[in-house]
Amino acid sequence: MTEDVSFNTSPFANGLRRPKLLESVYSLNINCFGEVLLMAAAPGLPRWEPTARIVLGLLGLVLSVYALHVEISRERDPDYRAMCDLGESVSCSKVFTSRWGRGFGLVQLFVAKDSVLNQPNSVLGILFYTLQMGLGLSVSKKTALALVICSWVSVAGSLYLASILAFILGDFCMVCVSTYVVNFALLYTNLKRRKAIEGMKEKTG
């Protein structure tokens, strides 16, 4: 003869009284907890997305920090030659120290050249890639939208600076072009992420 044993995780089991208010709160907490688990597992997100974001973010940070190092070194020593300076028309330091190397060449149209607002593009890059990795920890729709908007801005900036390289400076900057590739890859990643998160929200109601 076997004994029928049932397991109930509810604190109101085993004959205890079930006040309606407390029972409602308990049910609400269980439902919310289930939604949190679903969000944490994020089954709808592409499996490659978190890894791709970290790799692209770190790569962008490395490139930005190196660009800042080259610019500072060149300002201190005009004879400084960076590893990415391979020739007259293939020089990253030439680009970093040009007018367009700070504030996209646009900020100084409104403020003084040495203004604190006229920061090197590399500093803006450091902030951007840090933001991309930080916001990537959230799976909310608003955060996903913010990531996409930031990426579109970065891609627009990349196209603008690429045109400056080609048609005004007549230079090929390997570090610059590498950041452009990273920015386009991040845009693709963020678009996929937003689509997946919107699909998750629709399924969960």
Image (tube, rainbow, N blue to C red):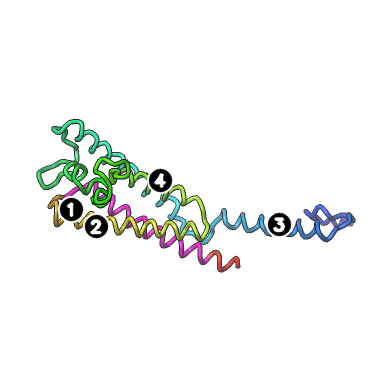
Q: Which residue is mark 4?
A: 130
Q: What residue is rendered at 37% in x and 55% in y?
A: 186
Q: Residue 2: percent from the left, percent from the top?
A: 87, 56
Task: Name the residue tied to disc 3.
Answer: 30
Give the amino acid type for the residue marked by disc 2 in the picture: Tyr
- Rounded to the nearest angstrom, the CA distance separating label 2 from label 3 is 51 Å
The residue carrying mark 1 is 165
Find numbered disc 1 in the image and state the secondary structure of the residue it sits on: helix
94 drawn magenta: no
- Amino acid at pointer 1: Leu
User: SS class of the residue under badge 3?
Assistant: helix
**Amino acid type, mark 3:** Ile
Q: Position of residue 46 (x, y in %)?
A: 46, 59
Between marks 4 and 2 in the image, the one whose residue lies nearer the viewer = 2
Q: Is residue 80 above or below residue 180?
A: above
Query: Label 1 near label 3: C-beta < 8 Å?
Result: no
The span shown in magenta is: 172-199
Closest to the camera, between mark 2 and mark 3, is: 2
- Residue visible at 54% across and 57% down? 42
Residue drawn at the location 31% of the way across and 39% of the way down: 65
* Residue 72 in picture, x, y percent from top left: 24, 35
Disc 2 target residue: 160
Alpha carbons under labels 3 and 1: distance apart? 57 Å
The mark lying in front, picked from 4 and 3, is 4
Q: Earlier along the polypeptide chain: callout 3 or callout 1?
A: 3
* Residue lying farthest to the top in this orientation: 77
Q: CA distance from mark 1 to mark 4?
A: 25 Å
Mark 3, Cα crowd under 10 Å, few <14 / some 14-19 / many 20+, is few
Whether 184 is among the magenta residues is yes
Q: Residue at x 21, y 43 (%)?
A: 96
